[in-house]
Image: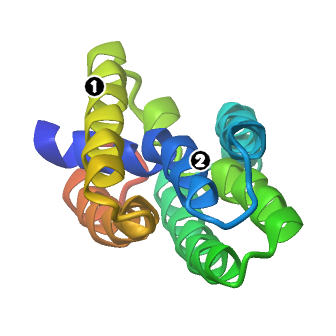
Amino acid sequence: MRVLELIARLPGTLLPFAVGLSLVSLAGVGWWTALAGGVAAVVGYVLSAVIAQVLVRRWGSWRNLLLGQTVAYVVLVVLLIAASDQQRLWLVLLLSLLAGTAAPAERVCVPNIRLDRSALGLSVLLTLACGFAGAWSVPLAVCGVTAAAAVPVLVMRRYRVDSEEPQ
């Protein structure tokens, strides 16, 4: 269960590094622009915690919020990959902010600072490995795949059908 929680936290922590790495690979884009893309994703990631708490108060269901965030996040990451491949810089910056905001709020639902640090470290290692290998878009794809695979499985394991509280 802990491994699943770690993988569910990975989309939010990996996104800033993935956006920066995909921007560095574009022709004519400097380090400052790549840093701006990463910062936009970090700002969205920080805002996602606040937005998640507001939405849970309104909807009252972590299960529905996590599943809704996952769908929105995967769609935004697919659009982000397409915008990066087409070298649409401003669209990449905007989509990275939106994707960071839509990142599944697993860290708010079940706070665990050790898992947060582990997800951040794993994100850095994955980004470094992909950067050295020249696989520029792989971290963005990993963001989408981990969100699409891990979060729904975690939600199904954690929440019963008749209850909104974690088991």
Residue at 26% x, 25% y: name it: 118
Q: CA distance from mark 2 to mark 1?
A: 23 Å
Relative placement, left or right, of 58 versus 158 is right
Amino acid tagged 1: Leu
The quarter of the picture where the C terminus appears is top left
User: Which residue is more in the foreground, 113 or 98?
Assistant: 98
Residue at 58% x, 68% y: name it: 68
Q: Which residue is mark 2?
A: 20
User: Which residue is more in the foreground, 97 or 49?
Assistant: 97
Res 1 visible: no
Q: Position of residue 53 (x, y in %)?
A: 68, 36
Q: Position of residue 164 (x, y in %)?
A: 43, 52
**Are the residues tagged 2 and 1 within 8 Å (C-beta)?**
no
Amino acid tagged 2: Gly
Earlier residue among tags 2 and 1: 2
Q: Which residue is mark 1?
A: 115
Relative placement, left or right, of 24 versus 160 is right
36 to 89, vertically: above or below: above
Q: Quadrant of residue 33?
A: top right
